[in-house]
């Protein structure tokens, strides 16, 4: 359970930061450190809580991060994947309403 | 003289025929060549376009064959290479029978990362249950050769 969570975090990391060696390595360290922090945790409810935190982090990585690749000077191509959460733009407050 | 004349006569008489023939040949031969060219070109094009497809297929097949071809020894060397690149593995301690946890001093998280690196390297997918059973170089070689055969 914990290991499959660890695995899915790494899978997502590889997908999201593809080609970005720095972020890939930083992500690897961070994921590992977070898991190591709690390696002696024995309380099942605490473990379940930690797992759901990890799942939340995985979902955040997958859905709320887009990688931008600079294609030209000051132009970035965003890699929006099928998992990327796309929301309607929040309407800006209109002056007339005020 | 008469013979000469005859020969000449024959020669004179035959010559136009030959000429005509040769003219005919000359005038018709371009058409023939043209037609032959057309005939040649079309089948050539058709056959070449047909020939290209099987060639591509063969290429793909060869590639696929090369993918399934590696022997156990080749898989083992590749597994060892992946392991050598893993920063926590001491290449000197590594052997074909190494146990990841007992011999190489890795933890379960490292094992997960190694299995993922192997997945990447061999372009295969290892299910979670299978991945949790991999604890040594031998296990990995076994699993990889099995999943390469399946494809």
Image (cartoon, rainbow, N blue to C red):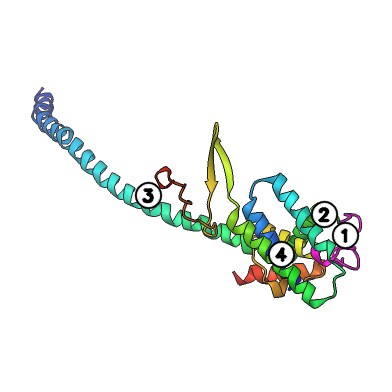
Residue appearing at x 17%, y 36% in the figure: B25
Do marks 3 and 4 share a chain? no
Mark 2 lies on a secondary structure that is: helix
Residue extending furthest toward the front? A98
Q: Quadrant of residue A51?
A: bottom right
Label 3, secondary structure: give it.
helix
Of the two numbered discs 1 and 2 on the same chain, state the one appearing first in sequence. 2
Chain label for disc 4: A
* Chain hosting mark 3: B
- The mark closer to the camera, 1 or 3, is 1
**Mark linked to residue B48:** 3
Label 4 crowd (10 A; few <14 / some 14-19 / many >=20): many
User: Relative to residue A75, is residue B116 depicted above or below?
Assistant: below
Left or right of B149 in this view: A26: right
Residue B124 colored magenta? Answer: no
Mark toward the viewer: 1 or 4 = 4
- Disc 1 + disc 2, Cβ < 8 Å: yes
Residue under pointer 1: B94
Q: Are marks 4 and 2 in contact (CB under 8 Å)?
A: no
Sequence-wise, the earlier of marks 1 and 3 is 3
> Label 3 to label 2, Cα distance in Å?
48 Å
């Amino acid at each position: 359970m914990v290991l499959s969570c660890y695995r899915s975090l790494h899978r997502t990391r590889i997908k999201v930061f593809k080609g970005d060696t720095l972020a890939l390595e930083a992500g690897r360290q961070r994921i590992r450190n977070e898991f190591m922090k709690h390696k002696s945790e024995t309380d099942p409810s605490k473990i379940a809580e930690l797992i759901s935190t990890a799942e939340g982090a995985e979902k955040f990585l997958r859905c709320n991060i887009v990688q931008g690749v600079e294609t030209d000077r000051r132009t970035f191509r965003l890699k929006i994947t099928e998992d990327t959460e796309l929301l309607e733009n929040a309407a800006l407050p209109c002056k007339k309403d005020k | 003289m008469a013979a000469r004349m005859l020969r000449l006569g024959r020669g004179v008489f035959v010559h136009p025929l030959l000429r005509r023939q040769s003219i005919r040949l000359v005038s018709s031969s371009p058409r023939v060549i043209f037609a032959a060219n057309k005939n040649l070109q079309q089948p050539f094009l058709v056959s070449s376009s047909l020939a290209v497809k099987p060639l591509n297929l063969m290429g793909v097949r060869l590639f696929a064959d090369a993918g399934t071809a590696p022997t156990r020894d080749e898989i083992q060397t590749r597994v060892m290479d992946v392991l050598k690149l893993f920063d926590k593995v001491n290449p000197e301690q590594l052997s074909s029978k190494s146990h990841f946890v007992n011999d190489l001093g890795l933890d379960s998280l490292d094992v997960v990362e190694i299995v993922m690196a192997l997945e990447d390297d061999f372009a295969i997918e290892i299910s979670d249950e299978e991945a949790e059973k991999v604890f040594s170089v031998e296990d990995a070689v076994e699993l990889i050769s099995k999943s390469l055969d399946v494809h």
